[in-house]
Image (tube, helix red, strand yellow):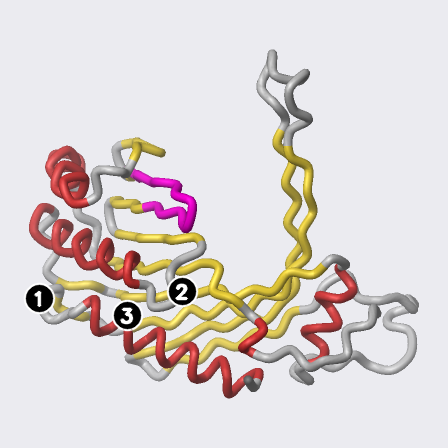
């Protein structure tokens, strides 16, 4: 199963993805006020470009050298996602604060039914068996001895998951392996310049979704404070889970 012997710890992982999301009762005002919503958002984030547009959902996004951000507003949901975010989620927080304020005003959203922050911490490996060994090294997943269901081979993937709720708050956690295949062919006419991109990546992922599941008045939600507190909880308990 490879030469991976060191126990996987939280400090071995890096923050790869984060998403803030609020859900609310369907607001069909988006059909009439979508232009006003996005005009307000683009005044604050002019670098955003249209990625998707249909009556129930509009998404804008941007790519930079240090991160990639997408903002989506739809009938009953607002989502801000960032790939390769800064460690304190400052850019995500600024966007989430502004977008929720715009949605509350333009779409007349007075309460949120769910507020969530999802984060993914990852570590890359050259071989799939090394990613599997990393998850197994935590001791959270244990393989039975001997052949498994007639097969004596290294597992192709491993996953450990938990979901907990107390009526007001909850979290879902996945510690798992993942294989990402990237196959980008060059556009017609450019085959003589590039062969495109063809890569396969193997990862160990700690994926945590921490959320409020009881209604929250939009006027009472302080996005900046809630994101900072929730990120602290995720990192603290991630270290408790894995060590580091």
Q: Residue furthest top?
A: 189
- Residue 127 colored magenta? no
The N terminus - image quarter: bottom right
Mark 3 / mark 2, whichever is N-terminal? 2
- What residue is at 68 percent from the left and 16 percent from the top? 192
State whether residue 34 is above or below residue 82.
Answer: above
Residue 84: x and y, percent? 44, 55
Q: Give the residue displayed 28% in from the left and 73% down from the top.
A: 228
Residue position for label 1: 219
Near mark 3 (Cα within 10 A), the count class, few <14, some 14-19 or many ≥20, is many
Residue extent of the magenta highlight: 58-70
Q: Secondary structure at mark 2?
A: strand
Local SS, label 3: helix
Gap between marks 3 and 1 measured at Cα: 16 Å
- For mark 3, what is the residue? 227
Label 3 vs 1, first from the N-terminus? 1
Question: Which residue bears the numbered disc 2?
Answer: 118
Q: Quadrant of the C terminus?
A: bottom right
- Dividing the picture into quadrants, the one containing residue 160 is bottom right
Q: Position of residue 237 (x, y in %)?
A: 45, 84
Q: Is residue 36 visible?
A: yes
Q: Name the residue located 68 percent from the left edge and 81 percent from the top edge.
A: 7
């Amino acid at each position: 199963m490879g030469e991976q012997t060191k126990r996987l710890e939280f400090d071995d992982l890096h923050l790869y993805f984060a998403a803030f999301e609020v859900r609310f009762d369907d607001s069909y005002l988006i059909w009439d006020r979508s232009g006003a919503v996005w005009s307000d958002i683009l005044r604050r984030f002019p670098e955003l470009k249209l990625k998707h547009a249909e009556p129930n959902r509009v998404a804008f996004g941007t790519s930079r050298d240090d991160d990639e951000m997408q903002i989506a507003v739809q009938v009953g949901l607002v989502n801000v996602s960032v790939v390769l975010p800064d460690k304190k989620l400052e850019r995500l927080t600024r966007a989430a604060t502004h977008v929720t304020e715009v949605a509350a005003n333009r779409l007349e959203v007075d309460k949120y039914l769910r507020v969530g922050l999802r984060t993914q911490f990852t570590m890359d490996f050259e071989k799939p068996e090394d990613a599997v060994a990393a998850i197994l090294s935590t001791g959270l997943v244990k393989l039975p001895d001997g052949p498994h269901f007639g097969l004596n081979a290294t597992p192709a993937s491993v996953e450990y998951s938990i979901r907990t709720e107390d009526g007001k708050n909850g979290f879902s956690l996945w510690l798992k392996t993942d294989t990402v295949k990237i196959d980008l062919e060059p556009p017609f006419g450019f085959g003589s310049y590039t062969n495109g991109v063809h890569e396969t990546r193997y990862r160990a992922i700690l994926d945590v979704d921490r959320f409020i599941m009881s209604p929250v008045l939009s006027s009472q939600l302080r996005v900046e404070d809630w994101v900072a507190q929730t990120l602290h909880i995720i990192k603290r308990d991630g270290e408790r889970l894995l060590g580091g």
